[in-house]
Amino acid sequence: MKDKKDWVEVLRHSKFVRSCHWGIVLTCLFLILTGIQLAFGYEIVDDPQALHLRLGIVFLGLWGLFAYFAMTEEWKWITPKRIPYSIKFVMEEAVAWVRGDHVEDPRAYDPKRKEYVEKVIPSQVLVWWTYVALTLVIGLTGLVLYDPELFKPFMNFADRLAMLFGINGYALVRGLHRFTMFLYITVAILHAYAATIFDTLHSMIYGTRREKVAWSSSKKISKEISKEIVGAGSR
């Protein structure tokens, strides 16, 4: 009897997911460039406001498609129930990083059952929900800035809140929009760094990745893994 392999090549990301992901990345880059031009006056492109608006609509549309896929196909890996597990992992990883080490990668695939035992790095749960929150804020504030009359209830609320800071609502919304952009850039940089550390960039380009094997008929799926993967039940 042949020994079972420790690694297996798996299709991790479909063409649809990869297309949405890189579409979001590209539109986000151009949104940042046109946003910088609108905010600080640097000459980058002609008519940055029109391009910024159109790209913003495309950006939100791609995010909508990506979110739909995540909610319907990947929900068990990103459910809010997993946030405590994700926080614990991030804290352990931070301690390990200070020591010059890494915590054990929990990702594993069971080729016998043809499914993942664990598909994501736990910190991705936090990254996902951070992206969702930032996308909602930057999308809403962008729409309010574009048409304050259409979104008058939000602008009225901003006006009342802005009085606490001695400014008007438009300035508050614009400031929140810019601040969220800087947060988005920060999270994106951390996300890109983590993609290199945890070797997920290749799968987001080519779709496949060599995954650690966890055989369902073997003790390799330990009780520790089962306990750690909290909230990763069926969708």
Image: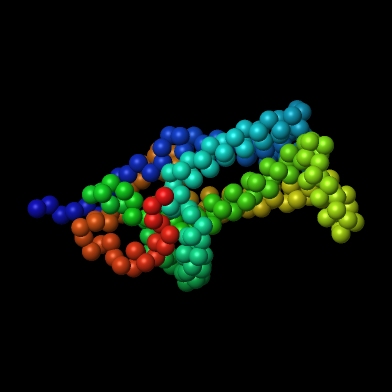
Residue at 83% x, 55% y: name it: 161
Question: Does 223 sit left or right of 76 as displayed?
Answer: left
- Residue 227 lies, in percent from the top left, at 37, 67
Residue 202 appears in which quarter of the rendering? top left
Please state which of residues 137 and 213 is positioned toward the viewer in this rendering. 137
Please state which of residues 40 and 215 is positioned toward the viewer in this rendering. 215
Residue 207 appearing in the image: yes
- Residue 45 lies, in percent from the top left, at 73, 30
Residue at 89% x, 52% y: name it: 167
Residue 174 appearing in the image: no
Q: Is residue 97 above or below residue 63?
A: below
Residue at 69% x, 45% y: name it: 138
Residue at 47% x, 64% y: name it: 85
| Number of numbered callouts drawn | 0
Q: Is residue 128 above or below residue 97?
A: above
Question: Does 136 sit left or right of 94 as displayed?
Answer: right
**What colour scheme does the image use?**
rainbow
- Residue 91 lies, in percent from the top left, at 51, 68
Question: Does 58 sit left or right of 224 as displayed?
Answer: right
Question: Does 135 sit left or right of 205 as displayed?
Answer: right
- Residue 199 lies, in percent from the top left, at 42, 51
Q: Residue furthest right?
A: 166
